[in-house]
Image: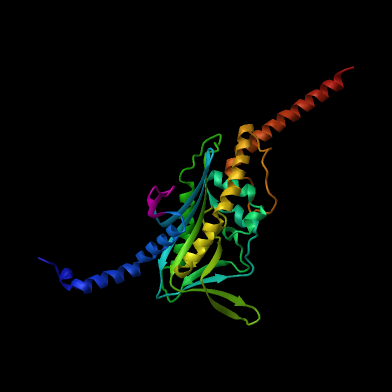
């Protein structure tokens, strides 16, 4: 016997339309369309990919991952986009921007999310001018710092979306890292770029000092340098992109992939030379302010080895000097 709830449901074409409408409002078609766009541009794509939270051990879902590998010799360079998809046709998204918050291209590159090898490689090469011309490390004059879903009350969907994109990208990048002592180089270098895809309208809001008022401009894509991430990531660069613009956005990334892969691979070979010598002396670090203090985790043990070698060398020099002073 059907219950009261089942009796109230429409049947036939009406039920079909109602289910389809519900799917759209939950954002599922947005995920499928985003995945299809990434696949068309040559990326390997996963939907509903789960990563394990390192603190709670609970699985968390990433809507779409678009990945591309470069394999050569003993190493793999992997570039991944982690897409958080949101249907919001009824409520436009607003991103607040400010001219006081731009990052330098070197800092933008250096603070890219990665695993231990990927993080070390991009930190090393972050000042390379070839990288600064790429959309991956584009630094707008007015980056976003926060936002809201218009007409919404209660849950801050903007915050939850960018927080999820940031945290899930970190979990995705670091899921295979092993915190061994001494650190081992590994053979896989990963960089992850978080993207929030909005099916709906997107607006930039900023304060115009001359007009003494907030200006509102419709956009297809806004880049945020977000400071609300975990302690591991000081600033997360996140792109907010409308679904209508995603094809153009992913096409640009696909074109630039070869350059990024090549630069990172050459740097990984340089890091390999450091591990073979057990020293950072062969490392070729590009110039430029990275916006972070200290070395990437992968280099800490090598730096300690260099310090030990330097101390031993200084001790030998002092011993030789004393022997010379004592000799008649």
Residue segment shown in magenta: 45-59
Q: Is residue 20 magenta?
A: no
Most foreground residue, 212 or 183: 183
- Residue shown at 75%/30% (left/top)? 314
Left or right: 57 with respect to 223? left
User: Looking at the figure, which quarter contains the N terminus?
Assistant: bottom left
Location of residue 97 with respect to 103 vertically, above or below? below
Please state which of residues 76 and 183 is positioned toward the viewer in this rendering: 76
- The residue drawn where x is 42% and y is 50% is 53
Q: Is residue 16 left or right of residue 75?
A: left
The residue lying at 48 percent from left, 51 percent from top is 68
Choose top left, top right, bottom left or bottom right for residue 91: bottom left
- Name the residue at 41% across, 71% down: 88
In the depicted view, which residue is nearer to us: 271 or 45? 45
In the image as oriented, which residue stretches furthest toward the right?
328
> In the rendering, at what x and y percent does residue 241 appear?
49, 66
Q: Is residue 164 left or right of residue 215?
A: left
Q: Is residue 106 left or right of residue 52?
A: right
Q: Position of residue 216 (x, y in %)?
A: 54, 78
């Amino acid at each position: 016997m059907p219950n009261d709830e089942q009796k109230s449901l429409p049947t036939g074409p009406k039920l079909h339309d109602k289910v389809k409408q519900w799917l759209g409002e939950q954002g599922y078609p947005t995920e499928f369309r985003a995945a299809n766009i990434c696949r068309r541009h040559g990326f390997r794509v996963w939907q509903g990919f789960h990563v394990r939270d390192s603190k709670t051990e609970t699985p968390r879902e990433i809507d779409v991952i678009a990945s591309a590998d470069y394999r050569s010799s003993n190493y793999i360079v992997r570039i991944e986009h982690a897409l958080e998809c949101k249907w919001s046709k009824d409520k436009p998204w607003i991103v607040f921007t400010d001219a006081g918050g731009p990052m330098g291209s070197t800092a933008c590159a250096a603070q890219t999310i990665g695993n231990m090898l990927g993080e070390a490689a991009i930190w090393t090469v972050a000042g390379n001018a070839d990288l600064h011309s790429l959309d991956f490390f584009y630094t707008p004059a007015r980056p976003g710092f926060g936002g809201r879903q218009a007409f919404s009350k209660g849950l801050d969907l903007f915050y939850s979306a960018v927080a999820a994109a940031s945290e899930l990208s970190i979990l995705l990048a670091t899921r295979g890292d092993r915190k061994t002592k001494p650190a081992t180089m590994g053979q896989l270098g990963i960089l992850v770029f978080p993207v929030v895809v909005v099916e709906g309208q997107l607006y930039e809001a900023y304060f115009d000092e001359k007009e003494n008022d907030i200006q509102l401009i419709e956009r297809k894509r806004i880049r945020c340098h977000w400071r609300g991430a975990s302690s591991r990531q000081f600033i997360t660069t996140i792109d907010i992109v409308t679904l209508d613009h995603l094809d153009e956005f992913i096409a640009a990334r696909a074109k630039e992939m070869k350059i990024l892969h090549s630069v990172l691979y050459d740097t990984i070979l340089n890091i390999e030379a450091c591990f073979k010598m057990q020293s950072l002396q062969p490392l070729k670090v590009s110039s430029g302010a990275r916006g972070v203090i200290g070395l990437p985790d992968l280099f800490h043990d090598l730096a300690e080895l260099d310090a030990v070698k330097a101390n031993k060398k200084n001790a030998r020099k002092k011993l030789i000097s004393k022997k010379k002073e004592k000799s008649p």
